[in-house]
Amino acid sequence: MSKKTSVGIDLGTYHTKVMVLESALENGKTATKILGTGTAESKGLRHGYIINKTEASKSIQNAVGLAEKMSGLSISKAYVSIGGIGLSSVSSNGATIISRADSEITELDVDKAIETSKSQIPAHYAVNRKILHRIPNMYKIDGKPIVGLRPTGMKGSKLEVKTLFVSAIEQHLEDLTEAVEEAGVEVVDFVASPIAASIVTLKKTQKIAGVVLANIGAETVSIVVYENNIPVSLEVFPYGGTNITNDIALGLKIPLEEAEEIKRGGVVGANYPRRKLEDIVCSRLKDIFELIDGHLRKLGRNSLLPAGIVITGGSSKVASIEDLARASLGLPSRIATLNFGGNIKNINDSVWAVAYGLCLIGLRDDEDAKIGADFVKKAGNKILEWFKHYLP
């Protein structure tokens, strides 16, 4: 029996979460098991940015220590999520002339086309940013689309590609790397938080039909839109559960701690005006869903995603959020649910989606199957391929 372990670190604005996952191959079957988890209050962050590396590193160290104690393992390296309002995406087109005399398309031609699309990214978008993921959305051979297929091995004279580039602010990546390393952990790779969460919260049928995953965190809402089993857009908005908490505190004239408990449904029997509370929460959630709807309109996909919206994150447990999302977006709506195998009893499923997704990425550690980044860390990380994760 062979075993592999993987560690994911989800550094959120509200909580830092660490998960240790084990994969065991026995009798030809692979089973995964959570060996340990660790949670610590995040400090030194604002809207996903690190504003104090020492405090952020201490939060990581605390969460890692708890995960080590629970799993009985020493954590030396991990896959790390990157989120925050500096995370965004842009689509760009590129083309190349097929190089071989027999017109057969090779990986070199594909790489050239993608590099050409990278060179077409607007200058104002590229400045001070590093590309995390390069995701081909669609190829054309001699002007004819081949959606969902790899062009290698096919024949033609001209190859075109539409590529989604997911990037983050360079300084934030550097700060995050230093914070993790100061905690005694090597960064194996960075993965955009919405993409990590989508691996474990979305089904393949949803990704093919068209779906938007919304992760409502403490200070940000991050979304990723899928069609034809491929991410077509990613965006982060500077709103989150903290805004709802603040509005409740102001509206009801109560302490922030109490407002947070009310938002999460933890206060029972208190004499608060129910109608006023509902109006406060609904008003802020409507603002969030209007931002999502506006983004879908830019993509031409508002009310046009058959699999609807899937909601995850710490604020996904707010009462009536599914109904409000359905009414605001005109889409089917549901809260993400996960199955961790039953061996860990005291974790809230959707809150751990990012960390769990990171761990699964880490277990697929052969070079042909990793999700990758153009951000090359001090460890000399290779450029890794995204696309094969999502092929049948």
Image (cartoon, rainbow, N blue to C red):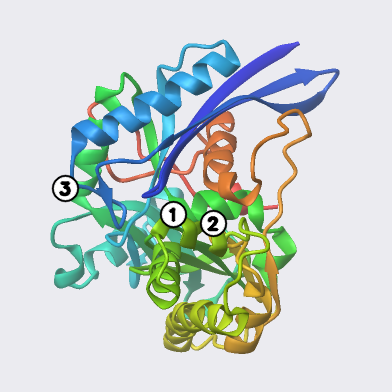
Reading the image, the residue beneath label 3 is 171
Looking at the rendered structure, the kind of residue marked 2 is Glu
Whole-percent x, y for residue 75 in the image: 45, 17
Distance (Cα) linking label 2 and label 3: 35 Å
Whole-percent x, y for residue 57 in the image: 28, 30
Instruction: Using the image, determine if residue 372 lies above or below residue 262.
Output: above
Question: What element does badge 3 sit on?
Answer: helix
Q: Residues within 10 Å of mark 1 (few under 14, many from 20)?
A: few
* Among numbered discs 2 and 3, the one appearing first in the sequence: 3
Instruction: Using the image, determine if residue 30 lies above or below residue 389.
Output: above
Whole-percent x, y for residue 85 in the image: 30, 62
Is 272 on the left or on the right of 126, as rendered?
A: right
At a point 37% along the width and 69% down the height, the residue shown is 239
Looking at the rendered structure, the kind of residue marked 1 is Glu
At a point 20% along the width and 36% down the height, the residue shown is 53
Reading the image, the residue beneath label 2 is 261
Whole-percent x, y for residue 246 in the image: 38, 68
Tell me if I can see residue 155 in this picture.
no
Please tell me which residue lies in front, 379 or 80. Answer: 80
Tell me if I can see residue 127 in this picture.
yes
Q: Are marks 1 and 2 in contact (CB under 8 Å)?
A: yes
At a point 28% along the width and 55% down the height, the residue shown is 168
At a point 67% along the width and 15% down the height, the residue shown is 3
Distance (Cα) linking label 3 and label 1: 33 Å
Looking at the rendered structure, the kind of residue marked 3 is Gln
* Among numbered discs 3 and 1, the one appearing first in the sequence: 3
Q: Kindly identify which numbered label has been placed on residue 257.
A: 1
Is 164 on the left or on the right of 124, as rendered?
A: right
Instruction: Using the image, determine if residue 37 lies above or below residue 48.
Output: above
Question: What element does badge 2 sit on?
Answer: helix
Question: What element does badge 1 sit on?
Answer: helix
